[in-house]
Image (cartoon, coloured by chain):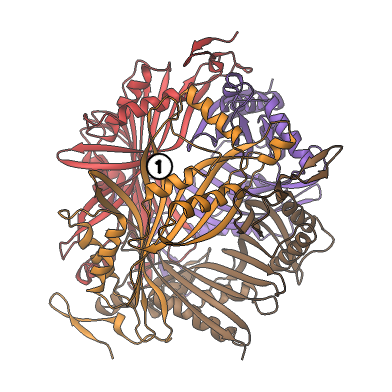
Chain colours: A purple, B brown, C red, D orange
Amino acid sequence: MNKLSVGQDTLVIDTQDEQPKHRIQLKKVGVKNLKTFLMTKKGGLRHHIIAKVELTIDLPADTKGVHMSRLIESMAEVISDEFSLHKSIEEIQIHILDSLRRRHFFNRAEIKFDFDFGYTSKTPVSGKRTWEVCDVTSVTVKENGKPFIHDISVRVTGNTVCPHSMVNNGGMTHMQRAIGTLRVIGTTDQVPSYGSMIEVIENSFSSRTYSLLKLEDEMHVTKQMYDNPLFVEDVCRGILQNASDTYKDRILDMFAEARSLESIHKHDVIAEGRIVTNGQ
Amino acid sequence: MNKLSVGQDTLVIDTQDEQPKHRIQLKKVGVKNLKTFLMTKKGGLRHHIIAKVELTIDLPADTKGVHMSRLIESMAEVISDEFSLHKSIEEIQIHILDSLRRRHFFNRAEIKFDFDFGYTSKTPVSGKRTWEVCDVTSVTVKENGKPFIHDISVRVTGNTVCPHSMVNNGGMTHMQRAIGTLRVIGTTDQVPSYGSMIEVIENSFSSRTYSLLKLEDEMHVTKQMYDNPLFVEDVCRGILQNASDTYKDRILDMFAEARSLESIHKHDVIAEGRIVTNGQ
Amino acid sequence: MNKLSVGQDTLVIDTQDEQPKHRIQLKKVGVKNLKTFLMTKKGGLRHHIIAKVELTIDLPADTKGVHMSRLIESMAEVISDEFSLHKSIEEIQIHILDSLRRRHFFNRAEIKFDFDFGYTSKTPVSGKRTWEVCDVTSVTVKENGKPFIHDISVRVTGNTVCPHSMVNNGGMTHMQRAIGTLRVIGTTDQVPSYGSMIEVIENSFSSRTYSLLKLEDEMHVTKQMYDNPLFVEDVCRGILQNASDTYKDRILDMFAEARSLESIHKHDVIAEGRIVTNGQ
Amino acid sequence: MNKLSVGQDTLVIDTQDEQPKHRIQLKKVGVKNLKTFLMTKKGGLRHHIIAKVELTIDLPADTKGVHMSRLIESMAEVISDEFSLHKSIEEIQIHILDSLRRRHFFNRAEIKFDFDFGYTSKTPVSGKRTWEVCDVTSVTVKENGKPFIHDISVRVTGNTVCPHSMVNNGGMTHMQRAIGTLRVIGTTDQVPSYGSMIEVIENSFSSRTYSLLKLEDEMHVTKQMYDNPLFVEDVCRGILQNASDTYKDRILDMFAEARSLESIHKHDVIAEGRIVTNGQ
């Protein structure tokens, strides 16, 4: 039997609430590739971000569909509340899931934002301010009866220098652009800031990279690369060790990936690993 | 002979200023895929944007290379000047090219920004505010002795409904997501606002699309689609005609593209055309 | 202490075999985004494929690096063996991992191919042959002491038609392109053919799609869409149910995703689920 | 007035042949992002290719639409003709446009294929065979009363080594992956083979790159990079000069681009230029 609800002036058949043909539970149903804009304000610093959003909930075996517009309304409510600027992306995500809770039943809800994150840096010798941009993916999950869990990945561009070639080649070697990723999973009070994660990654490359380099900076960076030859394996382990040291007081499940866009090959090389801190 | 200049404490060889091996003039040399952040403020409305930048200049046949860091410095100078917020993206681009002129010789310079542009809309029946995002590419070109030329493309998502299927199929038809593009080329005082270009494109679809639609809105949009079946050819011509009508007082070279993500095929269908207004 | 091995005419320092600075085990180390070409022949039908390859092994905590060239050599050996054409992509992957086993120590090795897969279809009324292409990802994993495991995903394009809009809107509705994914995990004798997986997915859409449709075919497809309105939730459950019915004699862990490129929104909607068959 | 044609058993209204609302000529109307498979055979060597296709024709101001299925039929006819294998991609394109001419009026038709192109190479010292893949875009244009024109772009991955850093930094420098593009435009008897274009590009890098490198090869490649430091400007000019020398007996309009994925920056640097050979 169809359920009925009252629309504008008319009875509406809520197809979503009917029995499905196949009674199979679904883990995630919702919207994806939705672009929206977000604002955060923390300590006087505003971030305006355009994010690609995925917002999903589980669907019980006996229900045909999700009321998709309620997912969007939960987002719209939080985003449009200009008078209460949020301190972080994760705070926005928590508020959206709280708002969704009041609109739609779920056992598990998940919201993911993919976005470019801008930060400032300083050139190593000339000391000029530079603007840098990295990739962030932030996921917040709410399961009934459990705390909010955040799953945050930060991807930063640096470089690697081959130690094997250097030692066998009289100091000559090949070097290349590399991408380091740190992913942390933890509760709201445990996950670190993006800035801190960027720092952990940048310290793990042969050298960090900059949008602006005057000649004296370029010489410094080049020398640092020769002084610090690293395989992707070394960069990946470096990220894991740095993260483990930096976040030793926190409870975090952490993953790292290093990918090197080899200058002597058309393909990349990668290394992936995992480390866990238990806050003690 | 190498030219020398004074670096930090040392003589520097300016390899860029040497003679190249092959004396061939190059049309564009510079940086690409550089991400940076930008702010504009117009009538109380602030836009914070992360753009992908391409900034290039021509290179004479007798010069080996471009001093790349001067391109970045020109951008950094304009972006970091927080006290003079720019009114538009194109104003930022003009200031960067002006700044570059003082740092590096060129006959022709070109700066391109690719970015997501957010705007608000209203659902057609329930009147709720929605947040929408479209793609913008803005290019500004400066050739010596000529005015700045802007080449702006706006891409917006809407839909098409097949009129051929509808008329041959007893009112049944196929419909699909579509992407409309309007590109305008003109001088600084002639090019229209992004908002106006979005409006031109959205009015050319079978229906515009929204991130949020309550049931009454969804019914309205669906009905409008059935009342307004359009081929991509119709959408493309519609954009051209609407643009020509809207901008008839301006001098613009304009191009339109409509692309339909066919629901009955795995491929897309497209239509492209051009129209010119001479401001009279 | 560095280990030494004999290269062409010289002693070589095998940096990879040294102790790493941080003694952390890595789960995956290897090559990624390597493009190569592959051939299979089964029952007279040849497939030539250009695949994007990821080939990785684990790295123990006390070893600094992987000998990357041995991974490539394992692939080259198998690919260049033109006299023994392989019957399937998975057979090629098994042979590469076998070859790698003889060259490099690992506890766990994994090889992934991403590629376009072409197949022929027939238009529904005019009966013309059409050429269709779908996306396939095939992963083969070998852990010491365990059988080869294959993890195969097939993504096919079809469409969805909104049942909610149809019932509330006097038979008018919105429809759109959709992408269905079926992923199966099982041993070599349990995983099905790509063709069979394509069939399962195509039968789960409101209608399948074709590269060529004459008018009579287009009418047929359109009518079928109106007769078979489905949410993404329905398509996802349909794939799971069809797969479960088709592969009930096999032992498979299966996942499905349906994604709909909504014609009334700029965003997509998705549904994801899982089903397991135990071969009884 | 609608035109009528006879379909299966019924009168069909050919909406496409009606008058459009806005009488604006369109430059290109057709299909895009259509994937299909192609075979060529030349001198015993078969290439099987999956290409992304764009096939478009112009549309006069007084005609509402293009009969899209005729575009697909033209392709299907040529592709399915297994008994007459074509010698080149461009020959396939010519046959498709010839086939289209018999089905649909046009003043100008254009067909574009984007695809991965595989070729074999040899490692520089160990002499092992390697499999390499590059990107090709091939466009064939037919305007009434004019010969077929081909517009072919080949993109190959190599590397650059900074000469400025090397000379100012005591032999230390930064190096990185780079992508070289050569684009040639000419008639059927003038355009060169892909293999020849690949050769021109690979000879213009600091060093070419290989999927497989044994240690002795890696040392050779690294040494070659140090011996041959090149800006992107040098690589771009090198491609143009090599192409001009290699194709001096042909009439070709040629463009080159070099893009370097800087290892000390997050962004790329590029150089673009053009050269013309007149066959004398």
Which quarter of the rendering shows the N terminus of chain A? bottom left
Place residue C90 in its image quadrant. Answer: top left
Residue B137 in the figure: left or right of residue B95: left
* Residue B170 pos. (x, y %): 25, 78
* Residue A50 pos. (x, y %): 62, 55
* Residue D101 pos. (x, y %): 26, 73
Identity of the residue drawn at 63% across and 34% down: A159
Mark 1 belongs to chain? D
Which quarter of the rendering shows the C terminus of chain A? top right
Place residue D132 in its image quadrant. Answer: top left
Which amino acid lies under the numbered mark 1 shown in the image of this protein? Answer: Val
Residue B52 in the figure: left or right of residue C273: right
Residue B269 in the figure: left or right of residue D277: left
Identity of the residue drawn at 56% across and 58% down: D273
Give the residue furthest to the front.
D280
Q: Which residue is mark 1?
A: D133
Q: Nearer the viewer, residue D242 or B233?
A: D242
Place residue D5 in its image quadrant. Answer: bottom left
Q: Nearer the viewer, residue C162 or C188?
A: C188
**Residue A5 vertical position relative to residue D26 in the rendered view, above or below:** above
Identity of the residue drawn at 59% across and 53% down: D271
Residue A207 in the figure: left or right of residue C69: right
Viewer can see residue C176: no
Q: Residues within 10 Å of mark 1 (few under 14, many from 20)?
A: many
Q: Secondary structure at mark 1?
A: strand
Viewer can see residue A17: yes
* Residue A274 pos. (x, y %): 56, 26
Q: How many marks?
A: 1
Q: Nearer the viewer, residue D230 or D68?
A: D230
